[in-house]
Image (cartoon, rainbow, N blue to C red):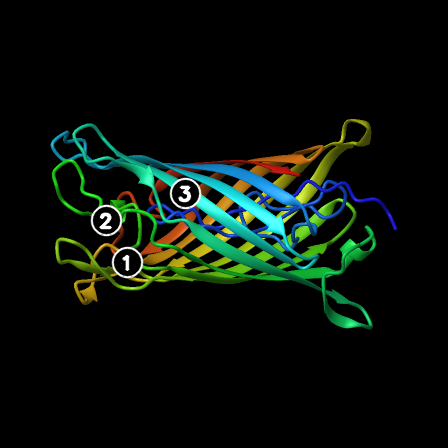
Amino acid sequence: MKRLLLALLFAPGAALAHHGVAGVGAAALEGPGAPVESASSAVLPQGRTLLYAKLDHARFKTYDPDPANPESAYANYWMLGLGHGLTSWFSAYLFAPYHAKIDEPGGLDSKGWADVSVMGQVGFKHEPGEGFKLVPAHESLDDLEDWHFTVFFGSTLPTGNANHRLADGTIDPGKAHGFGKPATTLGLTATKPLSRDLTFNMEASQLCFREYRYADGQTMKFGSERRLNFGLAQRLSTQPERRLRFDGVLEAQFLRLGRDIENGAPAAATGGRILYLMPGLRVYWDNASFAFGLKKPVWTRLNEADQQQGAEGKERYRLIFSASFLF
């Protein structure tokens, strides 16, 4: 049995422009690579604890130069996470997000802690001749060359202030600090090393919301969010004596947004389809991992594109940074 040097990380797959919720994933210093943002198919080692932090900085395109009509300028989505390997095949996570949604001068900014998320992740593998099985307590590097899968699931808790009022006293659901009711996530990942240095990763997931009535009487049900992500991680350099590894990563992320339902009717300027590409770098050092990515929309079909400034698909770019530490 070969000794594995693990440096696991949480990979939030869905830090979106007005939602910013969580996904799960992990990677190893020796063995398969991992994406920068999409969920991967590694669970935390039994009895080990993960600390995680992520920043998703979204800079939006602006179209109206009139200062009397301020538009969304940028948003920062911070995420703090805590994970624990309860068994060799099941990991549990708790996440606390902080959002800062900033308009151009004269606009209405929103900053605050959002809904906490709780998630679980079940890991299993497919072994030739034996079929599917839960991830065992110890795997060799040869074992890690098999197909690995996870099912992940979770829910937000209504800890954020859904009725947060902006500086002008109004409630904007898109700038609220919570959804008011739990939002649920269900997803599947698949990971397979294509060679010693190249790893394929796939994630398919869906996030669903419930209708909520705000303190001012309006109701909102955000449209469901479906993702299909693919990634390749290429090992660029390994320095065993320094416990250091560098991977180059390329991800393609498809996002389908359902139309929001506002006051019982389909809301204008919501929903659509977006394809993002993101090149990135992942660095493993001892029991820590750091990831960097530059994410840009390369194809969009928004429902009312000329009215959806500040929404997904209207970014100039998104900068992704995450750091994780395993104890």
Horizontal arrangement in the rendering, residue 144 relative to residue 258 (left or right): right
Q: Position of residue 79 (x, y in %)?
A: 45, 40
Q: Label 3's element? A: strand
Q: CA distance from mark 3 to mark 1?
A: 28 Å
Whether the residues at callouts 2 and 3 have beta carbons within 8 Å, the answer is: no
Q: Using a 10 Å C-alpha cutoff, classify the residue at mark 1 as few (fewer than 14 neighbours), some (14 to 19) or many (20 or more).
A: some
Q: Which one is in front, 316 or 77?
A: 77
Provide residue 100's location: percent of width, then percent of height: 33, 36
Q: Which residue carries the number 3 mark?
A: 97
Q: Quadrant of the C terminus?
A: top right
Q: Residue at x 38, y 55 (%)?
A: 157
Which comes before the other along the chain, label 2 or label 3?
3
Q: Three-letter amino acid code at disc 2?
A: Asp
- Which residue type does callout 1 highlight? Asn
Horizontal relation, residue 319 to residue 140: left or right: left
Calculate the distance from the C-alpha at mark 2 to the C-alpha at mark 1.
9 Å
Asked if the residue at tag 1 contacts the one at tag 2, i.e. Cβ–Cβ closer than 8 Å, the answer is no
Residue behind mark 2: 306
Vertical placement of residue 300 versus 29, above or below: below
Under circle 2, the secondary element is helix
Q: Is residue 163 visible?
A: yes
Q: Amino acid at mark 3?
A: Pro
Q: Are marks 3 and 1 in contact (CB under 8 Å)?
A: no
Residue that badge 1 annotates: 303
**Between discs 3 and 1, the one toward the N terminus:** 3
Q: Nearer the viewer, residue 99 or 116?
A: 116
Question: Looking at the rendering, which quadrant does residue 155 occupy?
Answer: bottom left
